Amino acid sequence: MKILIVGSGGREHAIAWKIAQSKKAEKIYCAPGNAGIAEYAECVSIGAMEFDKLVAFAKEKQIDLTVIGMDDPLVGGIVDLFEAEGLRVFGPRKNAAILEGSKAFSKELMKKYQIPTADYEIFDSADAALTYLETASFPIVLKADGLALGKGVLICNNLEEARAGVKTIMLDKQFGAAGNRLVIEEFITGPEVSVLSFVDGNTIRIMTSAQDHKRAKDGDRGLNTGGMGTFSPSPFYTEEVDAFCRKYIYQPTVDAMKAEGRVFQGIIFFGLMLTEKGPRVLEYNARFGDPEAQVVLPRMKNDIIEVMEACIDGKLSEIELEFEENAAVCVVLASDGYPEKYQKGFVIDGLEKIKEKEGYYAFHAGTKFDSDGKILTNGGRVLGVTAKGEDLKMARSNAYQAVEWITFENKYFRHDIGKAIDETN
Ligand code: AMP
Ligand code: GLY
């Protein structure tokens, strides 16, 4: 099969690596891809939002399957466009990707189908939101309705912060049209777990659990980022939690989407918080997590193309997912200063050492080739250095050893990925 992957980050590198293991994959393309993905795929310089060019490319190369890694094109309806052209594509259609694309939609869905989540109110005007906040209790959570690169969630400790938050989201439109509506949500606490799943419209198959670290600095301090590291599985995701989520969250979500006439085929990512009252859905995403994909996919035993095709064909019930009985840890190497100001364009050394070792991976997030083929840093998040181990402790120690093999000028990373967890076990 000829396969086209759409995207360019560490997640798409992990997807490309996994697809390259498939016995069905003969030729892989990636649009636009990056310097790491180029090892498995021919990278073509078409952006993920250039739908017409992507369709034309898929037709010209007679692509058998296109896999959409990112949220923006999914929410923008890329799948509908491919299908209309008779092209096979993995990912939810626009009317289902709204599960990620609108937080107001997902909250209303959960309320209607009694899927456990934090209490909330939805506002279309800043005035109404501000009036509501006068009598609210704090902390409270403000969420821009639409896609905001993971930055549209503000946790406000008092009325003053909340007023400023409403201004940022609804009046100053810091996240653009994503802030036309606002969800104001009850603040809840507990460990967070990311659970990814494959869905064929009816059947859902759950992948192994993971957890990410969103803050820039050790000890969960500093600014929110796209993710500074991740590990899998999460020790908090017990059999009891799993049983609860299967009964009250996973299948009910798939059934709810179907009942709404929004059949979901693709990946549902459940962002869960394990509160004292039980698991609650914090958010849904309609694609693999980044960086979660970088620890989940290396542990997956199945041929991913077979699973994706089963989702498209409604045959997922014929497949059982299998994961290795081990653990994986991914430490993101970033450019110092990320997520604010940072420099890029530095030579990265040491990648060969990782390539030579079984169970070690350097998934590229922001890299590029220079004119003599050297690999340079080209973003805030540069690499996801991932290693497996027999348990989290070993995986963590392996990943941090591999981090030392890689050098570039302004390398920055967190030292505590998976640490608190590792120490409680
Ligand atoms: P989201 O994009 O909705 O997952 O939110 C991003 C992050 O904000 C989550 O990973 C949580 O750490 C935090 N968060 C979101 N909703 C809540 C909530 N209701 N209570 C407490 N923290 C939250
Ligand atoms: N790691 C969270 C996300 O992919 O949205």
Image (cartoon, grey):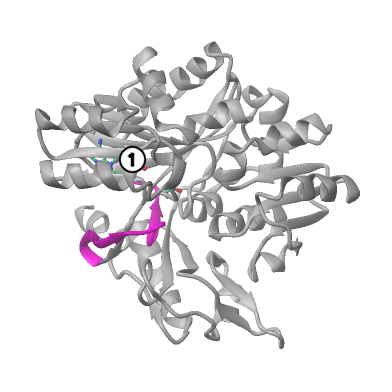
The tally of labels here is 1
Q: Is mark 1 within 8 Å of ligand 1?
A: no
Q: Label 1: which residue?
A: 170
Residue for point 61% across, 80% down: 375
- Camera sees residue 305: yes
Identify which residue, 263 or 80, lies in the foreground: 80
Residue 173 colored in magenta in the image: no
Q: Which residues are magenta?
A: 218-236
Q: Is residue 201 left or right of residue 381?
A: right
- In the image, residue 305 above or below residue 41: above
Rendered location of residue 267, percent (x, y): 56, 36
- Helix, strand or loop for disc 1: helix
Residue 227 colored in magenta in the image: yes
Residue for point 27% across, 45% down: 167
Residue for point 77% across, 31% down: 83
Identify which residue, 118 or 239, lies in the foreground: 118
Displayed quadrant of residue 236: top left
Q: Is residue 278 left or right of residue 23?
A: left
- Camera sees residue 235: no
Rendered location of residue 3, percent (x, y): 78, 49
Rendered location of residue 58, percent (x, y): 83, 47
Identify which residue, 28 or 310, lies in the foreground: 28
Bin the neighbour count of mark 1 within 10 Å (Cα to Cα): few under 14, some 14-19, many 20 and up.
many
Rendered location of residue 154, percent (x, y): 26, 46
Q: Amino acid at mark 1?
A: Met
Q: Is residue 349 left or right of residue 52?
A: left
Residue for point 9% across, 28% down: 135
- In the image, residue 366 above or below residue 171: below
